[in-house]
Amino acid sequence: MSEAYLKLPKKEQALILGKLSKNKEIKRDALLLEKDIWICWALEFLFKMPDRLPMAFKGGTSLSKAFKVIDRFSEDVDITIDYQAFNCGDPFAESTSKTKIKNISLQLRSMVTQHIKDALIPYYEKIILEQFKENAPTVEIDNDGETLHLRYPSVIEQKSGYIIDSIRLEFGGRNLTIPSEPITIATDISEYVKNLSFPVAQATVLSPQKTYWEKLTLIHYECNRPTLKEDADRISRHWYDISMLSNHQIGKNAANNRELLNEVIKVKKTFYDSGFAKYDDCLNGNFRLIPNEDYLKLLEIDFIKMLSNKMFYGEQPNFTRIISEIKELENSINGK
């Protein structure tokens, strides 16, 4: 049986990461290689949890880790817990009033918070106690009530300031976990270090076609903001992801799956609507994917931060080209 990487002394871990970060095939900074290991650790034990609620791994990190569609490091772990597991009623029934939907939404958020506090944190703490005698990670819930922070003991001394020693597991309980499929999630470096074992997750992963439409409707929401955000911190990645997806067969298939778009819009209008979202426009030829010039400038600043912190692998993407491609996509989706 091979020795576990996470059982090694910190100096040995640092040497391994430092050496591999110089490997021209891997093309990853040591900080990102380390964070990737902890992402896989968090996913491994989440999906090993006894009697866990029905849930699915989704979002940008799933596009990177499960489907290899995007060439960037995605550091947040998005998890959908099937709303039906909480038995709060059917928010999508035609007879359900707006007041009832609001109450169901509040109940679901509260139950996700309680699930993190009462089940997930004790479970992770038990695993941590069993696995680590020193240099142990810690877990805590965020003020938003739906995010679990896994803070790990980094072995890398030189920090960038952009990559923090923490994994954000962002849980949501106002969606369905279908369509999805089981996929093995492994670390980026496991195939290069055969004499050590690394975390491996057997995860249920949401369909990338659904992620495609969820990201597009998120972009549409952002483009309809009535007031400018102070910054676009870590938001430009959504435009990059859509650019990559649209050039992949997954995105091409998703673009023709308007039934899936209808399902995404139904959830968005039920739980995430606002006075400016205009989700109906996504169905009537007025999908909006390009924000105003001021917002574009903020997105470009955020994109440059990602470039400077080596978040992309291989050939470096061009922001102007991405926006041009998405403008074409906007016209195509809208039938223009």
Image (tube, rainbow, N blue to C red):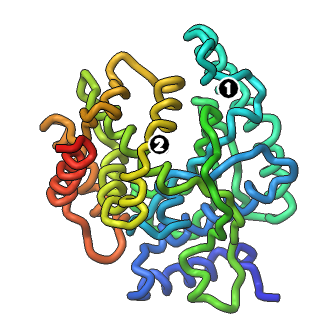
Is 198 positioned to the left or the right of 85 in the image?
left
Q: Please report the residue visible at 65 percent of the width from the left and 50 percent of the height from the top.
A: 56
Residue 311, image x, y percentages: 37, 64
Which quarter of the picture shows residue 106? Answer: top right
SS for dot 1: helix
Q: Which residue was labeled with disc 2?
A: 259
Q: Nearer the viewer, residue 157 or 204?
A: 204
Residue 325, image x, y percentages: 20, 56
Q: Please report the residue visible at 58 percent of the width from the left and 64 percent of the height from the top.
A: 154
Residue 11, image x, y percentages: 62, 79
Total labels drawn = 2
Q: Is residue 201 visible?
A: yes
Going by the numbered disc 2, the residue's amino acid type is Glu
Which quarter of the picture shows residue 117? Answer: top right
Q: Are the residues tagged 2 and 1 within 8 Å (C-beta)?
A: no
Q: Which residue was labeled with disc 1?
A: 108
Mark 1 surroundings: few (<14), some (14-19) or many (≥20) residues within 10 A: many
Q: Please report the residue visible at 49 percent of the width from the left and 49 percent of the height from the top.
A: 210
Residue 284, image x, y percentages: 29, 31
Nearest to viewer (mark 2 / mark 1)? 2
Q: Give the vertical position of 85 relative to 138 (above or below).
A: above
Q: Give the vertical position of 194 relative to 90 (above or below).
A: below
Is 84 positioned to the left or the right of 238 in the image?
right
Q: Give the vertical position of 278 relative to 310 (above or below).
A: above
Q: Nearer the viewer, residue 281 or 27?
A: 281
Q: Is residue 230 visible?
A: no
